[in-house]
Amino acid sequence: MMKKPPRIKLPDTINTGEIIEIKTLATHIMETGNRKDAAGNVIPRDIIHTFTARFEDQEVFSATLGSGVAANPYIAFFMRVPGPGTLTLTWLDDEGTTTVEKLPLNVS
Amino acid sequence: MLNRRTFLLEGSAAAAVLALLVGIPGVRAEPAAAETPEFKTTLETLLANAKPHDDGSLVLDLPESVDNGDYVPVALAVESPMTAENHVKAVHLLSTANPRAAVATFRFTLLSGKARVTSRMRLAKTQDVVAVAELSDGRILLTRRKVDVKVGGCGI
C-alpha cells in the first residue's frame, strides 16, 4: 500500500502532437520477499508489480516490475499527445491495492 | 578444529590468494559476479532462439560505479520512429547476479512517441546488467553494462 499519493510531473504547457515526458514517483516499500525478520521468518513479497498509463481508452505505456526495482518506484516515460483528454495512471501491488490517478491534459 | 585464530588465518590466506588472482585491490575493478542459472534461463526464454543484435541502437545507461546498490538510476532507450511499421514493442531489464533476474519489462505503444524509460534498480553486487529490446519487425536487440557496486542493495 502506498503511504502517500504518488507524485506526478507533467510539462506546464502541452501542444497537440507534442511528445512529452511524464515522471512518476510512487511511495512503496517494494519488499523483495527475500528478507527475514528478527525471528527468522521470511517477510512476504510486497511490491508494485504493474504500472499502466492510458490516455482515454488507449494504452500509452506499461511496466511489469520485479523485486529488483528500487523502493519508491520512479518511472519516467514519454507520450505523444494526440489532443485533449485524460491520462489515467494505475499502480497495482501484491497486497491487492490499486492506486489510480486521473490527470486531465490541458492541451493548447 | 575451527577456532577464531585458524579462521582468521585461513581467511587472510584466502584473501591473499584472491588478491593475487584479482590484482592489487583498489587498483583493478572488481570482476562482475557470475551469471546466475536463473538469469540464463530467463534470457533463453526471452530470446526464444532468436539471435540478438547489438548495433548500438539500444542504449542502456547506468553509472559505472555506485556506492549503494539500493538506488541505481537506469535509463533505457532505443532510437525508433515509433510508427506502425517500425516501433519498439518492449524493453526488458535483467540482472545477471541478483536473486531475481527479471527486474522490469517496459511496454511501448504508438502513443509512447519515444521508446525511452528511466527508473531506479537494485543491485546486490558488482555485476553485468542486460537490456533486451523487442522490435516490431521481429528483431531482438541486446546490450549489457557492468556496474561496480561498493555496498549491495540490502535484502534484495
Image (tube, coloured by chain):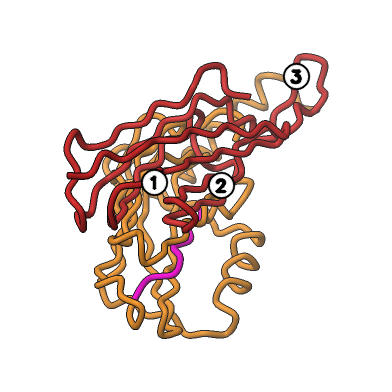
Chain colours: A red, B orange
From the image, which quarter does the C terminus of chain B lie in? top right
Q: Name the residue under label 3.
A: A37
Q: Which of B95 and B31 is in front in this view?
A: B95
Residues at marks 3 and 2, CA–CA distance in whole angstroms: 24 Å
First reached walking from the N terminus: tag 3 or tag 2: 3
Label 3: few (<14), some or many (≥20) within 10 Å? Answer: few
Residue B113 in picture, x, y percent from top left? 29, 61
Disc number at residue A65? Answer: 2
Based on the displayed image, in which of its 4 quarters is residue B144 positioned? bottom left
| Chain label for disc 2 | A
Label 1: few (<14), some or many (≥20) within 10 Å? Answer: some
Residue B17 in picture, x, y percent from top left? 49, 45
Amino acid type of the residue that numbered disc 3 sits on in the rendered structure: Asp
Q: Name the residue under label 1.
A: B30
Q: Which of A93 and A103 is in front in this view?
A: A103
Left or right: A9 with respect to B122? left
Disc number at residue A52? Answer: none
